Amino acid sequence: MLKGSFPALVTPFKDGKVDVDALKRLVDWHVDQGSQGLVPVGTTGESPTLLHEEHELVIKTVIDHAAGRLKIIAGSGSNNTIEALHFTRFAKEAGADAALVVTPYYNKPTQNGLLAHFLAIAEVGLPIIIYNIPGRSAVDMAPATMAELAKHEMIIGVKDATGDLARVAWQRDLCGEDFIQLSGEDATAHGFNAMGGVGCISVTANVAPKLCAEMQEATLAGDYAKALQLQDRLMPLHRAVFMEPGVSGAKYGMAKLGLIDEEVRLPLMPLADETRAAMDAAMTHAGLIN
């Protein structure tokens, strides 16, 4: 079972290149902070601007350095089925525990197209987490389609970024209680688990991994009062991280903690001064900085 807090890991850069040493330090830090796993090369890992060889470098580095200490869900999705197959095969060979595969963006396939896309990738033989994020991909996987895919033994769950908490219960009913549902939206992660979810693939957990892991652990133990106290500490940070693209917010927070350089790749930009001030205030509220 994949459950708990899974930071959607940023890809650290230095002078335009992947900072492999910093990436390894981040893996160690997340082990120490209590994260249950990592998701390298999702969109928070700046997958749209990574070269293929960089994509594979990040996945292999994270898996090798984690050395079984964390579950690794490797980002391997694409709007090109051939490319998604390539990255999923690579993730399997590298030793990933599962692959995160986004619904194809921009080309807007039908529900039948989604079925064919995911069933083709499932034949690689690596467990698949569907990433449903209609706000970015411009296509929404219907719960009935997900239920059909859930019949395949290699399609084991979903990262749901619809923001619709009722859908969690709907998918639980259609896909079964064992179908893994992970939140893809930090601000609703507490309520998501109350509706049947078992974790979160989190952007905020790049900056506050211990708090996010503790919040997840509390919900999974049924202690929603404790979880709510932790979510109250995190809520301003959830808002501030996403005032601009979450990658930039997360990297600013991590740089503030001395973990990595703030560098992002175009077309992303460093944070505006107003957003930096909001991040500073939110990190102070969470107890991450004085």
Image (spheres, rainbow, N blue to C red):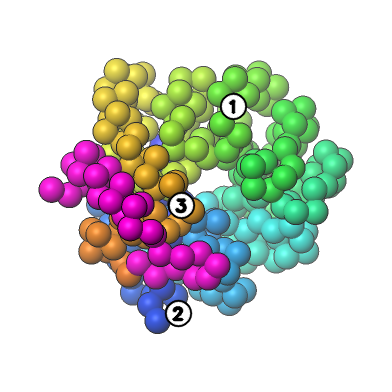
**Residue 87 screen position, x and y as percent:** 65, 64
Give the residue type at disc 2: Lys
**Residue 74 screen position, x and y as percent:** 54, 56
Label 2: how many Cα within 10 Å (few below 14, some 14–19, many 20+): few
Magenta part of the chain: 262-290
Of 278 and 85, nearer the camera is: 278
Give the residue type at disc 3: Glu
Residue 164, numbered label? 1
* Residue linked to disc 3: 244
* Residue linked to disc 2: 17
Give the residue type at disc 1: Asp
Residue drawn 60% across and 64% down?
48
Of 108 and 88, nearer the camera is: 108
Residue 76, numbered label? none
Residue drawn 45% across and 23% down?
191
Of 116 and 262, nearer the camera is: 262
Snapshot quadrant of residue 219: top left
